[in-house]
Every structure is written in structure tokens, then in C-alpha cells.
């Protein structure tokens, strides 16, 4: 939750510094806005934590259904690509400003790939697809409220960055917390925790 707090305050402060219209309910007071961003960041952290545990539960159930980890990994990989296309389509359909409809999915995919690459360097190569799925698809699902309704680029950015930071922190800390330095995926971590 502290990662969400820090990411929200930093993101919100940069957004307020670059766009003077960005504020909470039209209020421009920097101290009040920083306090509200911190509260929202705590909420994003809690929401991300719930999404992470929901993913671990889904992962455990899916592995028991599919019985072969490569089938579940293939489905996660397909779902990640589908979610990237869906995000771009949603933003294009809403007639997003400029290049957001392709820049946001590609930027999120690139950031997810970088974090996933670091994850496989710390564990092993079979952690790449599950990490990508968590970092892109689950972040996309968690940020769904910002993507709905009238397109608000500031709201999307303000919600996506802290959620991604929280998810990245959680996936990078999972094998350390469990003391399993060779965990190949979140599923292996769940099995070792039992």
C-alpha cells in the first residue's frame, strides 16, 4: 500500500506541476491535493493487493484444471495479447486524443516486458508469461474504472501508473517473501506456500 501511496503522490505531483488544471474537485491547494493523492494511493495499493491475490487464486485453480502448465501459460499469453488489442480498441472507439489508443497499450506492454525480464533473471524463464499476464492484463482489469465512460487521459494515467507500480512490486517480491529463489512462476510460489 505504501508503494501505491508513493506512486500516486509522485505521479499526481508531476501531473499537477505540468497541468495546472489537474486537481481534486477543482481545488488547487498543493498540500490538500498531496494528502488526497496519498489517500487514493493507499486505496490503489489495497486494490492492487486484492487483484494480486485473486490472480494467485486463479492461477492455482487454472493449474488444477489444465494439469499442464504450458496450457495455462499459453492461455495467459493469448489473454495478454487480446487485452492489449482490446485496450487499444476501447481507446480508439472513444476517439481518444492523439495517439493514446496505441501508445498506452504499447507502453504498458513494454514496461511489463521490462519487469518480466528482470523477474526471469531473478528466477527462471518460465516466469515471463505469468508476469506479463499479471502486469498487463490484471493491471488493465484493475484500471477498468478509469477506462470507462467519458475519456479522461489524466484519470487513466493517474490510475494506471500506481496500479502498475504496485503489481510490479508484488511480482518482484513474491519469490523473496516465500524464500523460493528458483520459483518459476507465481503458481510455483503458491504450491511452495502450501
Image: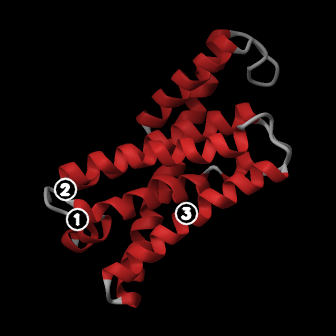
User: Can you tell which mark lies on residue 184?
Assistant: 1
First in sequence: mark 3 vs mark 2: 3
User: Cβ–Cβ below 8 Å for labels 2 and 1?
Assistant: yes
Q: Can the viewer see residue 44?
A: no
Quarter occupied by residue 130: bottom left
Is 30 drawn above or below residue 88 in the view shown?
above
Quarter occupied by residue 23: top right
**Residue 11 rendering spot, x and y as whole percentages:** 56, 25
Nearer the observer: mark 1 or 3; the answer is 3
**Residue 194 rendering spot, x and y as whole percentages:** 22, 74
Is 127 drawn above or below residue 28 in the view shown?
below
Residue under label 3: 81
**Viewer-side residue, 130 vs 117:** 117
Q: Residue at x 62, y 11 (%)?
A: 31
Q: Is residue 116 left or right of residue 144?
A: left
Residue neighbourhood size for the residue with mark 3, other residues' Cα within 10 Å, grouped as few (<14), some (14–19), many (≥20):
some
Is 96 drawn above or below residue 33 in the view shown?
below
Residue under label 2: 123
User: Cβ–Cβ below 8 Å for labels 3 and 2?
Assistant: no
Q: Is residue 84 left or right of residue 189?
A: right
Locate the N terminus by quadrant.
top left
Amino acid at each position: 500500500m505504501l508503494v501505491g501511496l508513493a506512486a500516486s503522490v509522485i505521479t499526481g505531483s508531476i501531473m499537477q506541476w505540468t497541468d495546472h488544471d489537474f486537481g481534486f474537485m477543482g481545488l488547487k491547494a498543493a498540500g490538500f491535493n498531496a494528502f488526497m493523492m496519498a489517500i487514493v494511493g493507499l486505496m490503489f495499493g489495497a486494490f492492487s493487493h486484492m487483484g494480486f491475490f485473486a490472480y494467485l487464486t486463479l492461477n492455482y485453480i487454472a493449474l488444477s484444471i489444465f494439469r499442464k502448465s504450458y496450457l495455462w501459460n499459453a492461455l495467459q499469453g493469448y489473454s495478454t495479447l487480446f487485452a492489449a488489442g482490446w485496450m487499444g480498441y476501447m481507446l480508439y472507439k472513444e476517439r481518444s486524443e492523439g495517439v493514446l489508443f496505441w501508445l498506452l497499450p504499447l507502453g504498458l506492454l513494454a514496461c511489463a516486458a521490462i519487469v518480466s525480464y528482470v523477474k526471469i533473471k531473478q528466477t527462471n524463464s518460465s516466469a515471463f508469461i505469468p508476469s506479463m499476464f499479471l502486469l498487463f492484463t490484471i493491471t488493465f482489469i484493475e484500471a477498468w474504472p478509469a477506462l470507462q465512460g467519458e475519456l479522461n487521459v489524466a484519470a487513466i494515467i493517474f490510475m494506471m501508473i500506481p496500479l502498475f507500480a504496485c503489481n510490479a512490486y508484488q511480482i518482484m517480491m513474491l519469490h523473496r517473501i516465500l524464500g523460493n529463489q528458483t520459483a518459476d512462476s507465481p503458481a510455483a510460489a503458491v504450491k511452495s506456500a502450501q
